[in-house]
Every structure is written in C-alpha cells, then in structure tokens.
Amino acid sequence: MRESLEGVFRREKVRVVGALVRIVGSLDAAEEVFQEAALAALDEWPSRGVPANPGAWLTTTAKNRALDIARHRRVVLEKTPLLVSDSSVEPDTLRTIHDDALRLIFTCCHPLLSLESRVALTLKVVLGMSTDEVARALLSTEKTVGQRLARAKKTLEDSGVPYEVPEQKELPERLDAVLAVVYLVLNEGHTAREGDLVRVELQAEALRLAREVCELMPIEPEPFGLFALVAFSLARAETRTDEAGDLVPLADQDRARWDRRLIKEGLVALSRARRLGGGGSYTLQAEIAACHVTAPDLERTDWARIAAAYDALAAIDHSPVVAMNRAVAVSRVAGAEQGLAVLAPIADALDRYHHFHAVRADLLARAGKSPIASLERALALVTNEHERRWLVGRLVAAREKEAAHM
Amino acid sequence: MPELMVLVVSNEARDEELTPAQTRDLLEGHASWERELRDASVLVDAERLRPASEGRRVRARAGEVEVERAPAEEALSAYAIVRAEGWEQAQEVARRLPTPPGTVVEVRPVMKRHTRPDKTSQPGRVFAFGVLGSAPNEEAWIEVMDRIDARTRNGFPGERWLGGVRLEAPRSGRRREHGALFDGPFLESKEVIGGLFFLRMQSIDEAVAWAATTPFVEEGALEIREVWRS
C-alpha cells in the first residue's frame, strides 16, 4: 500500500518548491534545494522509516536549508533579500501552501514562455519528472530539454516575472496558458507523433496536473471541464490500440474494457463544470467525449447532442479542426453528404493534416464515393507508424472493393 | 423549520457494475434533484463523497490506534440537509431521489448544525469525518455520542474547520430500502453514524494522523472520506 519514495517526491514537489521559490527567490535555486532535501530523505527514510507526513518533512528540511542559503547570501551581499524573513521558519498555513502551489503553476505556465517551454517546465517542476523523463515525454533528448529548461528559467528571471497568482482581470488569459499545457500533454499522450501511438502514462500525468489545478481553483469551470476530458480519454486509452500497437477506431473498440471508474470521475467533474456555468471550449469538448463514453455502441451514440455541442464549440473556436470534427457529427445526424459539405470550406486550411484526409475518406466511402485519393494523401502526410499501417489497411480494402466492382 | 439530513448509503461494489450510461443518468438525476430542492429554498447543504475504497476508518482499542479501509458495502456516498415542514415532506423528498438498486436512503433529524455550503469553493482538499459509535442499544449509543460531543467541543483545528452537524438517534429517523420506508431501526453491533464534520486536510494521511489523536477514536470511530467536488 505504501507508495515509492519517488512517488512521494513527485506528489509533494509542487508544494515544497512553491514555498522554496518564495524563500530563495529563484526557481533554479529552489529546485536545487528540493533536490538536496530529497537526497537527505533517501538517506534517512529507509533506515528510520517514512515520516507520517512526508510532505511536511520535506518542506521543513528544504526550508531550513533554503534559509541558511538566504542568510548566507545576506551576509555576503550585505543587503537584505526582500523575500526572506524569519517568519518563514514558522510552519506554513494551509492558505500559504495553496497559494505557493498556485504561484508556482502560474509561473511555470507564464505566457511569456513558448508553449513547449511551459510544458517542459511544468512536467519538471510541477509534476516532478526528471529531465530525462521530460525528454522522453516530449520525444526529445536530455540535452535539448536541459537547455530549454535553463533558457526558460533565465527568461523568467531576466524579465522579472513576479512570483504571484495573477490578479482577477488577468486571470482568464493566465488560466488559459495553464490549461493549454494540460491540453498539450493530453494530446501528446492521446496521439503521439512517433513511437507508441497512445501513451497512457502521459495522459495520467495530464490528469494529475488537471486535478491539481481543479483543487487550487475550485470555482473555475474550465479546469473541471478539462479534467473530465482527460479522464474520458484515459478511460479509453487501453482500447485504442491492438496488440501490435495499431490504431483501433472508435467503432471497433471494446467498450466493456473502458474504465468505468474514470468515466464516473469525468462525469462528476463535468457536472461541476456545468454547475459553475461552464460553456467554455474544454467543457464542451468534455460534453462531446461524455456522449461517446456513455454510448453502448457507435450507432446508439447521441449524435444530435454531439452535433449541438460542436455547434456551440464552433461558435467560440473557429479552428478548422473543430469544423472537421463537427463534420463527422453532422454526417451522423444528417448524412455523409452533409458532412462533406461542412468539410469543403476548410479543405485548404487542413490540406497538410493527415486526419483531415482520413476523415474525408471515411465520409466519401459512406457517401458511396471513392476514398482512394484522400487515403493516399493522408498516407503521404502521416508520421506515426501505427497510424500509417492503419491507413494502409484501409487503402488496400478500398482498392480491393473498387476492383471487385469493376 | 426543522432540518433533516438525507443520507445516501450505497453499495459501491454493486454501483461499479452500472453501465456508464446508467451512471450518467443517476448523476444527472441527482443533480436535478438537488437543483429542484435549491430552487424551492429547501436545500441547506449537500455534498457527494469520494469512494469509500479511498477512505479510512480509524478507532482506538486499548490505546492502540487501528486504521482500516472504509467499508464499501454500506458507504455514505452523498447527503443533503433539507428544511421540511414534517415527515411527509421529508419522505417525499427522499422518495424523489433516483438511486440504483441496493441503495439505502436514510433520513435523520438534525440535532444541531453549523455547516457552510461553500466548503468545496475553498482551495485544497476537504475531508468529511463521520462520527461513529457502537453500543448494545440505542440508549447506550446516545450516551456515547453525548460523551464524544462533550469531549470534543473545542477540539477542532481552527484554520481547517469547515463546520459540522450532529444527528438525532436512528430511532427518530426513517430508512428507505427496496423502495419502501421503515422506521429508523437501531442496528446492534454496528457502528452507527451520529454526525459529520468537515476539515481541510492536505491528504488522507494527514487526516488519519489528526484523527488518531482525538477522543472520537477512543469513544467510537471516525470514518474519513474526501468530499467529491461535484
């Protein structure tokens, strides 16, 4: 039942480092102190036993170390660091702990940083991954990620980004920047660019991050909408590929194997998002996903409700990808021809996106037309080997079918 | 107007067999039941609790603290405190709540209450602590609850306190089982709930560590369950 020490460090890192940045004044120094405290724990816990409240132990150990450093620096530089006061030795109140964690999340996800840097920094500092793990998560090398992290921390320091929770008027934009990070981690876990198509562990990290944001901002609807979306995705993750790692389309997934606990988790979060007035993009996407995970099969899916949610989504999100997905819902409600009509105006915008051609191929086939040209175009663009194999399968089947009719 | 607490006692193992569509319908039914009560200004406070499989039961036997998983067969999964004119109205409220088979709905008069409906609007995790007592008969059980009440009146950590409620004895309540309503029976050799209070805690471990130091677990037991933001 005991979790691993590494698990404890990962879970506690956001709160401990959150407090440390306040004391030592920089993310880099805070991470170093955390590392030292973690090493001290590795030294002490195996022999003396894991303390009843490991988070408090880590915080106290790390804070004492941080205060030493800060005092030392004060002597050396003969100036008083603004952030340090001896009251920092007192145990933090719950309010301070929550504020620290939230400050840290908002800092790592600052819009000043590129989305890629935000993601790398969040995986490392908030979710407690090692640089090597971040590199693997982002399909990059340890060196590249290390450089990216260093640059990101420097950018934050150089531009003097204050370590604080944004004010009310800034909040929507800043929260968007945080949720975009969760969403990117989810997407990378949902359809990886290369290697294993579905990466369950990354989706689990996205869920953990979303849960953290929900707990810290419990009256904002969108974090709950996004949490639900991640939970629904994770519930299906294991059934989206076969033994060979190839894609299994929604129609063929074994719905009995979908994780019912996670589905319930998502449904409860979605109901909170609704109650808080949610009509934002993530909540609407979760509404759509909820229709899929509660349907007994593809035919008995509530396509009308899905199409309505897509209409609402298209009104606030003009991205062609939303229009593309809306086309699929429309085709289920009104027929494949209607779906193709929704696709037509976005064909140029999505011409380099293999999903678009795969969707178009599907609608063409259902409308009794040849999907071959679209499948060939999708194949020319696809990068993931498992998706490629799946598309090849469809192309072969389409060619055989047309040959038989000739 | 008198207040009553509607306690939804679920069989979690059975609930896990529900299809996602059934779960969705039940959740939506529960949400609209609550909404109607709120619109009618009947609802005082309501929460859903996370699964008992994540919760703990803490008690002390001869000075030794025992911690076990909260039982999942009869798990408090949600509650609602309502204002009701009398039993007829309260029973009608309980009857309208959609529940899956195997669920018991218990209605108990509130003895005293100091709860706040904005518990889950606060950042951080919120835990519900069910106050349990076991006794050979109802009179003895009431004595246990009185003793706990007297010993714990000022024993809550201030910054974390989010209110609580004490219930009248089971005899003064009603139970809805298999669709029918019964007088509230006193169940011997069982730990019977006498109240519920709420504290902000960082984790279940922290909640258990706090619980182990309190008179609650000497006189009876505490069932600790996280409040589910819903």
Image: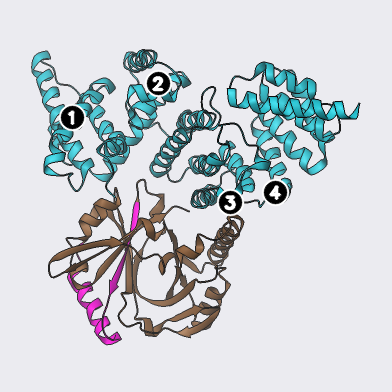
- Name the chain under label 2: A
- B220 sits left or right of A262 in the view: left
Q: Which chain is cyan?
A: A
Residue toward you, B58 or A257: A257
Q: Is residue A406 visible?
A: yes
Q: Secondary structure at mark 2?
A: helix
Residue toward you, B228 or B85: B228
Mark 2 in CB contact with mark 4 (< 8 angstroms): no
User: Looking at the picture, which amino acid does disc 4 mark?
Assistant: Thr
**Which mark sits nearer the N-terminus, 3 or 2?**
2
- What separation in Å lies between label 4 and label 1 (alpha carbons)? 52 Å
Residue drawn at x 52%, y 52% as measured from the top left = A260
Q: Secondary structure at mark 3?
A: helix
User: Looking at the picture, which amino acid does disc 3 mark?
Assistant: Ala
- Name the chain under label 1: A
Frontmost of labels 3 and 2 is 3
Q: Secondary structure at mark 1?
A: helix
Q: Quadrant of residue A141?
A: top left
Q: Which residue is mark 1?
A: A39
Residue toward you, B154 or A246: A246
Q: Which residue is mark 3?
A: A256
Mark 1 in CB contact with mark 2 (< 8 angstroms): no
* Quadrant that contains the C terminus of chain A: top right
